[in-house]
Image: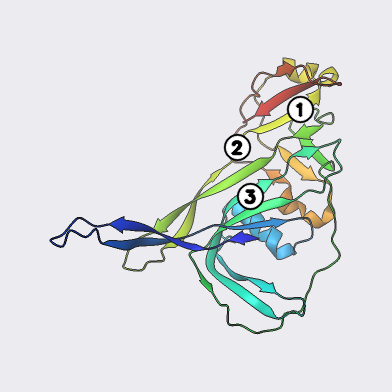
């Protein structure tokens, strides 16, 4: 976990009679808080991600804190953040031949942060045994297409635009989510299985789904499903020579 620091632009004023370039701070900004996590976060965390992906009434800002403690559990630094919204969710690249554990990256945009380095509280570790989810454990579903031969999917970053309410004289502006931006889905198939997909470019009804084969990920959050509009035809495939076996790259938007 990183980020959350406060920054501000420095404005240089026009020269006055004293011929000194005076300066002052403009509006205060706060860096995104970056959370990198695996498959063993709490259900409420995944539910919050699911609500953000749907932009429904269950999606709301969250308050929280990042805490640094020494070996005895005594807090040495604490950063509190208020009214944070999810700005980006990055799903890892998936590869059927990889043994790499999967990690997700979530960027939170706080309304403001505050530091507290005077706390002397004792925190008790609640870390449970780590459960590794491997990036090779996945399944892709596209209505009307046989995707059982898909062997890799590129990383997918979904962003949520936010609008700041700059009304009033407060320096820390309230924010609200506006638009969900979903990138194209890129994947590869061994060339020997790609003939049907290359010749059939009919539009598909929406309902594409990437499902991670790990129950603790809570499919409601980590099966990404798009149902808002009809899917567009897949773009033309590009048979690119690759190391054995040859693969075909495809993209759907």
Instruction: Give the percent coordinates (x, y) of residue 51.
Output: 62, 56
- Quadrant (top left/top right/bottom left/bottom right) for the N terminus: bottom right
The mark that comes first in sequence, 3 or 2, is: 3
Disc 3 to disc 2: CB gap under 8 Å: no
- Disc 1 is placed on an element classified as strand
Q: Judge the density around disc 1: few (<14), some (14-19), many (≥20) Cα neighbours within 10 Å.
A: many
The mark that comes first in sequence, 1 or 3, is: 3
- Disc 2 is placed on an element classified as loop
Residue assigned mark 2: 183
Residue assigned mark 3: 89
**Residue 207 falls in image quadrant:** top right
Of residues 163 and 227, the one nearer the viewer is 163
Q: Is residue 144 visible?
A: no
Residue assigned mark 1: 188
Q: CA distance from mark 1 to mark 3?
A: 22 Å
- Residue at the spot x=16%, y=62% of the render? 18
Q: Is residue 96 above or below residue 117?
A: above
């Amino acid at each position: 976990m990183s980020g959350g620091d406060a920054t501000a632009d420095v404005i240089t004023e026009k020269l006055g009679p004293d011929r000194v370039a005076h300066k002052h701070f403009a509006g205060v900004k706060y860096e995104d808080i970056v959370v990198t996590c695996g498959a063993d976060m709490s259900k409420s965390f995944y539910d919050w991600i699911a609500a953000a992906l749907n932009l429904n009434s269950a999606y709301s800002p969250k308050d929280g804190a990042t805490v640094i403690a020494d070996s005895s559990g005594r807090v040495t630094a604490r950063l509190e953040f208020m009214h944070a919204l999810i700005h980006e969710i990055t799903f890892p690249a998936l590869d059927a031949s990889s043994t790499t554990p999967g990690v997700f990256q979530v960027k939170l945009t706080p309304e403001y942060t505050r530091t507290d380095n005077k706390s002397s509280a004792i925190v008790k570790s609640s870390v449970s045994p780590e459960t590794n989810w491997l990036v090779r454990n996945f399944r892709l579903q596209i209505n009307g297409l046989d995707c059982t031969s898909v062997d890799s999917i590129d990383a997918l970053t979904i962003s949520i635009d936010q609008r700041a309410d700059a009304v009033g004289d407060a320096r820390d502006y309230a924010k609200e989510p506006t638009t969900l931006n979903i990138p194209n889905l890129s994947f590869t198939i061994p060339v020997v299985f790609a003939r049907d997909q290359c010749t059939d470019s009919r539009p598909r009804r929406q309902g594409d789904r990437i499902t991670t084969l790990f129950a603790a990920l809570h499919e409601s959050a980590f099966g990404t499903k798009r149902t808002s509009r009809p899917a567009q035809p897949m773009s033309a495939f590009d048979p690119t020579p690759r190391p054995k076996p040859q693969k075909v790259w495809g993209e759907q938007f």
